[in-house]
Amino acid sequence: MRHITLSRFLIEEQRSKNVICGDLRLLIEVVSRACKAISIAIGKGGMADVLGSAGSDNVQGEVQKKLDVISNEILLEANEWGGHLAGMASEEMELPHAIPNRYPKGEYLLLFDPLDGSSNIDVNVSVGTIFSVLRCPEGMEPDEKAFLQPGTQQVCAGYAVYGPTTLLVLTLGDGVNVFTLDREMGRFVLTQENVRIPEDTREFAINASNMRFWEPPVQRYINELLAGKEGPRQQDFNMRWVASMVADVHRILCRGGIFMYPLDSKTLAKGGKLRLMYEANPMSMIVEQAGGRATDGRRPLLEIQPESLHQRVPVILGSKNEVERVTAYHLK
Ligand SMILES: O=P(O)(O)OC[C@H]1O[C@](O)(COP(=O)(O)O)[C@@H](O)[C@@H]1O
Ligand SMILES: [Mg+2]
Ligand SMILES: [Mg+2]
């Protein structure tokens, strides 16, 4: 295992595979530095005034946590002057953030969920940052329309997990690699190359308290898992639910599993709980690049044509054979 830095990894990817150009490399470096700063802010916890609510709501109608706002500002400030972006969009902002005129503009659009797993911030459970990179269509202003591209158009996607260690997980469309933050040196180091998700699993992640609101195909699928050896699946399954998508998905990257936030009668009007552009799409690109599958129960998530920046969708992703099974239950 070559423990090279993120910078060297990106330079070698550029030289050897030409999957990345200078501006995209700069963008990823800047986002990784922002994740480092967020990791430091989170690490201060009760010693600094970063826990609790910010006393404001975001465009989703959710109460913002202080760290939602702090993380959002860190990512905006880090990325707006570099000359690699045409525009940015965030879970915490209703409209895209235009790059101020005093700064040069680039060709990329950056979307992010600055702090994922907000309900876990104040209880010291792993949270994260999720990001997705698109190209701004030729001749288009970086307004909301420019961002509405299917997940297949992503040139890069990643997430950071702020847990016992801080990890950065990245795909450039050529496999998935994991970097660990070396706190002493203050830099990310490659620790896992070309990660593959096992096709089969005995572990599922879903918020079971919503069971009575689920559609029949999900009820059937979960009931079969819960029936275990005595049931039609003739084997036992275990459940995990961290309630931070980054942590639940990272576990799946490490040892397989299926993550589900399906459509239910509570979120029907909104189209689901999780957001397509900066949660479902980047996570789907990573999972599929690692050999897994990602659907909304009926169609591949990456092929969905977005209609709005904060659109919500049902999310089912992880080990190939389980995702295909529960999707087949929906299509029957
Ligand atoms: O509280 P629930 O219903 O278990 O939902 C948990 C889900 O909500 C989220 O926290 C939503 O993300 P944000 O925290 O970024 O709003 C996901 O990370 C997680 O998978
Ligand atoms: Mg989130
Ligand atoms: Mg969030």
Image: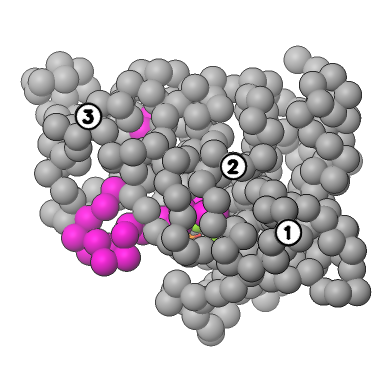
Residue placed furthest toward the bottom: 55
Left/right placement of residue 164 relative to residue 262 reads right
> In the rendered image of this protein, does residue 30 appear above or below residue 187?
below
CB at disc 2 and ligand 2 closer than 8 Å: no
Label 1 vs label 2: CA separation? 17 Å
Pick whichever, 261 or 237, lies toward us.
Answer: 261
Q: Does the residue tagged 1 have its C-beta within 8 Å of any atom of ligand 3? A: no
- The numbered disc on residue 153 is 2
As drawn, is 253 to the left or to the right of 299?
A: right
Marks 1/2 in contact by CB < 8 Å: the verdict is no
Please give the residue where the numbered disc 3 appears in the rendered image.
Answer: 328
Picture quadrant of residue 321: top left
Mark 2 surroundings within 10 Å by alpha-carbon count, few (fewer than 14), some (14 through 19), many (20 or more):
some
Q: Amino acid at mark 3?
A: Ala
The boundaries of the magenta stretch are 257-279
Give the answer, above or below, for where 235 lies relative to 187. Answer: above
Numbered tag placed on residue 139 in the rendering: 1
Sooner in the amino-acid sequence: mark 1 or mark 3: 1
Question: How far across and how far down the image is residue 288, in percent?
Answer: 50, 29
Q: Amino acid at mark 1?
A: Gly
